[in-house]
Image: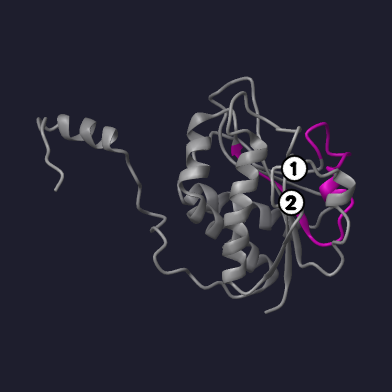
Amino acid sequence: MSKKIILDPGHGGRDTGAGTSPPYESQLALEFSKVLAQAFETQGFQVAMTRTEDVHVPLDDRCKGTEGAAAFLSIHMDGAVSEKASGPSVWVHSKAPKSYLDWGQAVVDGLKGVGITSNRAQAVHRGHVDGPQYDYKVNRDTIPPSMLLEMGFATNEANRREITGHAQEYAQAVVQATCKFLGEDYTPQEGKPNPDTKTISLTELGEMLRQYGVYHITLG
């Protein structure tokens, strides 16, 4: 396989994006994009990134040189006044074919399937948050199939923990959905956590044990 994927970690530098404290959207997007790049490369794709450091890259520059790529994914995290808002979402071009919507839905379903917290009623959209007649520049001014992927909310503590603590699983979910969209075989990666296995903290474990009258445990 020699198909090329372009990853666009949103914001950067002076433009921190969403979030009221570090890690901001720009930092979360960059770190996840690096993990995602490795996951795509493991499947045999060539990967290019619009930025690999915490620097500002103009939107016009992000959208250049996309000819010949199989897909363009712009990685972001949402922001909201309510800290309870959670979950991934996808935006595609206002005139994108249904296959793009199916791709976006597969990405969202995959992310939720490996445990990202979500309370969104609808997660896949055409157009722009300001209306379906508009488009995000990363969808309007790029050539290959594209999406703007909001991995979750930078203003939601659970989503922030998940994107940093489970980036490998989330990356595999995005890659698997994209492989299906592009008609490429996906090879599951050995050593990756089972999507059906939930990871809990020691605090959560302690609370569970106390429900059964166990107050002291020894970790050997």
31 or 184: nearer the viewer: 31
Q: Tell me the crowding category of disc 2: few under 14, some 14 to 19, or many 20 or more residues within 10 angstroms, Cα based.
A: some
Identify the magenta region. Answer: 128-152
Residue type (three-letter) at the residue carrying disc 2 = Arg
The residue shown at (67%, 73%) is 183
Q: Which residue is mark 1?
A: 55
Q: Is the Cβ of the residue at disc 2 closer than 8 Å to that at disc 1?
A: yes
Res. 51 mark: 2
Asked if residue 68 is among those painted magenta in the image, a careful observer would answer: no
Q: Outermost residue toward the bottom?
A: 1
Residue drawn at x 51%, y 47% as measured from the top left: 112
Q: Of the residues shown, which amino acid type is indicated by label 1?
A: Val
Specify whether residue 151 is in view: no
Asked whether 135 falls inside the magenta stretch, the response is yes
Q: Position of residue 195 (x, y in %)?
A: 42, 55
Find numbered disc 1 in the image and state the secondary structure of the residue it sits on: loop
User: Mark 1, residues whose alpha carbon is within 10 Å: few (<14), some, or many (≥20)?
Assistant: some
Q: Residue at x 61, y 65 (%)?
A: 40
Give how far apart the Cα atoms at labels 2 and 1 are: 7 Å
